[in-house]
Amino acid sequence: MKTLYHGSKDIIEHPRYGAGKPYNDYGLGFYCTESLDLAKEWAVSVDRGGFANCYEFDCADLAILDLNGEDYGLLHWLALLLRFREFDASGPLALEAKQYLLENFAIDLAPYDAIAGYRADDSYFSFAQDFISGAISYQQLGRAMHLGRLGQQFVLKSERAFDRLRFTGYEGASRDEWYERKMSRDRAARREYLDEERNRRQPGDLFITTIMDEGMGAGDERLR
C-alpha cells in the first residue's frame, strides 16, 4: 500500500481514467507523488492556490515500471520524454539524437499499470535539451538530475490501477507559501547547474555524438 498525493487546483475525489493531457512526461495518466510537499508545490501557480489530494493506492500484483531500477537508465527516461513532450529539436544534431534515442531506448508502456520516475519540470527539461543538443555529456546529465531535489513522480496508466486508488482527503496549498517554494527549488537547480555542472566536463565523458557514433544501446555498460 502506498500513500500518494496529486497536486491540483481542484479537489479530485474520483480520478477518471482516460482524462488529462496526452503530452505529459509519460503520456496520458494520473500524475502523483509520494511527497506531500511536492504535491503542494505542483498544485499552485503564480495567480492561485490549490490542493494536495491524498489517496491510498494498493499496488499489489500491479505491473509497475520503475525507471530508477537497475534495468533502466537516463536514456530510457529521455526517450519517453521525446515521445510525449514537445522538444526544441530544430538543430540537425538534436533531430538525429531524438531519432536515435527513440529507436534504441524506447519502452513499450502497454504492459504496465503505473510508472515511477523523474518529473521533467522546466529545469530538468532544459537539462535534457542541452544533452540532445550536445552541450553536456551523459555524465553531466546524470548529475544534473539530482540538483534542487526536484522530485519523483508516480503515474497511474491503466484502468486497473485507477480501480486501486482510494481518496482519503486533501490539504490546501496557499499560493503565497507554496509557489515561492516551488520557484525557489527550481532556481536552486538552475543556479547549481549553470554555476557548477554545465562547465564541468571530465575526460572520458560520453556525449550524444559518441553514443550514436559507437552504436551504444540499452545494454551498454558505459551507460550504467
Image: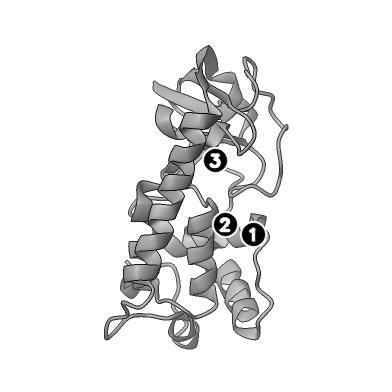
Q: In screen coordinates, is 119 left or right of 143? A: right
Which is more N-terminal, label 1 or label 3?
A: 1
On residue 80, which mark appears?
2
For badge 1, the amino acid type reads Arg
In the rendered structure, the answer to whether residue 30 lies left or right of residue 41 reads right
Q: Determine if residue 64 is in view.
A: no
Query: Dividing the picture into quarters, in which one does residue 101 lie?
Result: bottom right
Dot 3 and dot 1 residues touching (CB under 8 Å): no
Q: Amino acid at mark 2?
A: Leu
Residue designated by label 1: 83
* Distance from the alpha carbon under mark 3 to that under mark 1: 17 Å
x then y, percent, for residue 197: 34, 70
User: Where 141 sits versus 212, above or below?
Assistant: above
Side of 39 where 194 appears, left or right? left
Residue at 62% from the left image edge and 80% from the top image edge: 96
Circles 2 and 1 in contact, beta carbons < 8 Å = yes
